[in-house]
Amino acid sequence: MPRHAPRAVLSSDTEPAAEHLQIALWRRMSPASRLRSAAAASSGALRLCLAGIRMRQPGAEGSTRFLAFARIRLGADIAAHLYCSPVLRDFEQGTTMDLVDVALLVAGALDRTGLRYVVGGSLASSVSGEPRSTLDVDVMVEMTEEDVPALLANLGEDFHTEPEGFARAIRNRSSVQIFHLSTATKVDLFVMGATPIEPEQMDRRVRVEIPDRRGAQLYVYTAEDILLQKLRWYRLGQEASDRQWRDVLAIIAVQTDALDLAYLRGAASQLGLSDLLERALREAS
């Protein structure tokens, strides 16, 4: 069967013909449109969450509803840590922001600090594959310990940050979590250097213009690089995540012959992911 009519079934409850039509529609969308579609899906899910809170607590004040919302999004322990002091956030205003808005705030702080970054995770896979909802934002950043004070200042009071977490992440080439307080959104900042190909991935990043935010832009992984990231996380998760694997297949199905297979195979070999990549290419062809 031709590459442009993939046989892979992304969802067991969808007929192949219907799925192929859906993939064709995703291909016709611009990268920015796919990103906005994913953000809208996430916002829709959160609005339903809010509706459930209002239904269960009809007479509650805004601050009480916000704390219930934060517990659902972040877990009880993190919510208690972030909102331990009596504080009344603008509950309704905060929850009208979507994940792209939060990502833009983080990107702006990184830009002002002079740090290179690239957005990953499900936001990036939505740019290159299936637009889907997600709960948080993943960003890889190139930084040193000397950059931390300026970055914390540029993030400002809108975000909860812990300086010691940054120092640890930079030393270990791991990640640190920050939290956008008015939306209870978690942002994972991954310090570049966890794998040998990450510097090249940073160099390869692409810019996505956000059409409904004047002059706004985000740097995201290329289709090849977010595919590799998804394969890596799939393996690190003991190959148990159907969601990660579906993201991989959707990227291949949407991108088709636009993927740089030579680059993909070379990078996958460096990461020990060649078997997973070839399996994915077979399933999506």
Image (tube, rainbow, N blue to C red):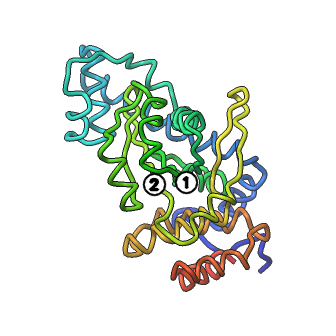
**Residue 233 location in percent, x, y?**
45, 67
Left or right of 82 on screen, residue 17: right
Amino acid type, mark 1 = Gly
Most extreme residue toward the bottom is 275
> Camera-side residue: 230 or 3?
230
Q: Quadrant of residue 54?
A: top left
- On the image, numbered disc 2 is attached to which residue? 190
**Residue 27 location in percent, x, y?**
75, 56
- Give the label on residue 159, or none: none
> Camera-side residue: 257 or 12?
257
**Residue 31 location in percent, x, y?**
71, 48
- Give the label on residue 120, or none: 1
Q: How crowded is the residue under tag 1: few (<14 C-alpha within 10 Å), some, or many (20+)?
A: many
Left or right of 168 on screen, residue 193: right
Question: Which residue occupies 80% across, 77% down?
Answer: 2
Q: Is residue 113 above or below residue 66?
A: below
Report how many numbered discs are placed on residues in the image.
2
* Residues at circles 1 and 2 in contact by the CB criterion of under 8 Å: yes
